[in-house]
């Protein structure tokens, strides 16, 4: 698994680095440098790829911090609906590129919990990112929310490749990634769900997965309110 992780990490960074290099070379082309719209287009591409690399670095650093128990949480009263909406906004381009569609079904009358805004945003982002990555065709994703047991429940359902019971028992392990023979079939470090579970544990919540091969997956997260009111 460590070998796979190193291979994946190399692959994950080589792609955006190559894109940034290509964009920089293109901007310096005399035919492009005087075309403001094209320059802005390639600058936007560079910024996007740079942000991608930053997210990858942050993911690795977060796991290292969790190992050392150095990760810090800033608990405050926040709306989970606001967090989910914000994550969807930031991932909109990624979803559109795959001709995907996200349906929101917000049934929770009270979306407020006491939690860490940054880490809960990362949690939602990781689960949504998986739903997109493991949908081979155009992703069809449904996000549902409800209130239960003095807390907030949200689920992210996809119609992707799904997984066996054996895979489900391993997905929260460090570096584990479901593959189909090639470690690069689905990009990633295999850290996202391990980190997600750590964040949920820190909020005294739970996470469950329902999945069948070929029929997609549903991840359901429960977070207690614990409001400081």
Image (tube, helix red, strand yellow):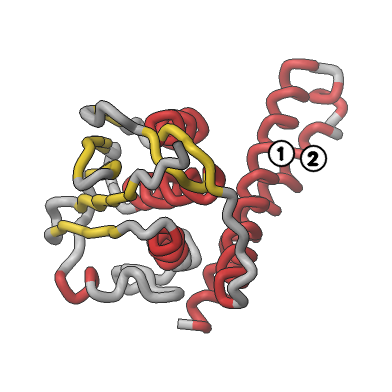
Task: Give the residue displayed 39% in from the left and 63% down from the top.
Answer: 201
Q: From the viewer's perspective, is 209 left or right of 203? A: left
* Relative to 34, 7 lies left or right: left
Q: Residues within 10 Å of mark 1 (few under 14, many from 20)?
A: many
Up-down: is 100 above or below 56? above
Please tell me whether residue 137 is drawn above or below residue 213 in the rendered image: above
**Residue at x 25% of width, y 31% of height:** 108
Q: Residue 190 location in percent, x, y?
A: 44, 68
Q: Is residue 211 left or right of residue 193?
A: left
| Residue at position x 73%, y 16% in the image | 37
- For marks 1 and 2 on the same chain, the one whose residue lies earlier in the sequence: 2
- Which residue in the structure is indicated by mark 2? 24
Q: CA distance from mark 1 to mark 2?
A: 8 Å
Which sits in the foreground, 100 or 127?
127
Give yes or no for contact between labels 1 and 2 (Cβ–Cβ under 8 Å): yes
Q: Secondary structure at mark 2?
A: helix
Q: Could you tell me which residue is drawn at 29 percent across and 69 percent down? A: 180
User: Whole-percent x and y of residue 93?
Assistant: 48, 31
Q: Quadrant of residue 147?
A: top left
Mark count: 2
**Is residue 186 visible to the viewer in this orientation of the structure?**
no
Quarter holding residue 109: top left
Mark yes or no: residue 60 visible: yes
Question: If the image is split into quadrants, where does the N terminus sit?
Answer: bottom left
Q: Give the residue at mark 1.
A: 46
- At which x and y percent is residue 92? 45, 30
Q: Which numbered tag is attached to residue 121? A: none
Mark 1 vs mark 2: give the one in front: 1
């Amino acid at each position: 698994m460590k070998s796979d992780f190193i291979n994946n990490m190399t692959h994950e960074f080589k792609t955006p680095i190559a894109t940034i290099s290509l964009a920089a070379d293109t901007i310096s082309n005399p035919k492009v440098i005087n075309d403001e719209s094209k320059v802005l287009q390639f600058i936007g591409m560079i910024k996007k790829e740079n942000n991608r690399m930053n997210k990858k670095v942050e993911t690795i650093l977060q796991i290292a911090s969790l190992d050392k128990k150095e990760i810090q949480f800033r608990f405050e009263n926040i709306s989970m609906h606001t967090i989910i909406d914000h994550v969807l906004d930031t991932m909109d381009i990624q979803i559109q590129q795959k001709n995907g569609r996200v349906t929101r079904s917000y049934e929770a009358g009270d979306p407020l919990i006491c939690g860490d805004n940054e880490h809960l945003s990362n949690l939602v982002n990781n689960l949504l990112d998986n739903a997109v990555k493991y949908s081979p065709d155009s992703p069809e994703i449904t996000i549902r929310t409800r209130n239960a047991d003095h807390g907030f429940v949200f689920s992210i359902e996809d119609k992707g490749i799904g997984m066996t019971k054996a895979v489900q028992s391993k997905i929260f392990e460090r570096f584990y990634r479901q593959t189909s023979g090639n470690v690069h079939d689905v990009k990633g470090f295999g850290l996202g769900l391990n980190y997600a579970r750590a964040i949920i544990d820190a909020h005294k919540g739970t996470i469950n997965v329902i999945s069948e091969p070929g029929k997609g997956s549903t991840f359901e997260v429960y977070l207690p309110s614990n409001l400081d009111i």
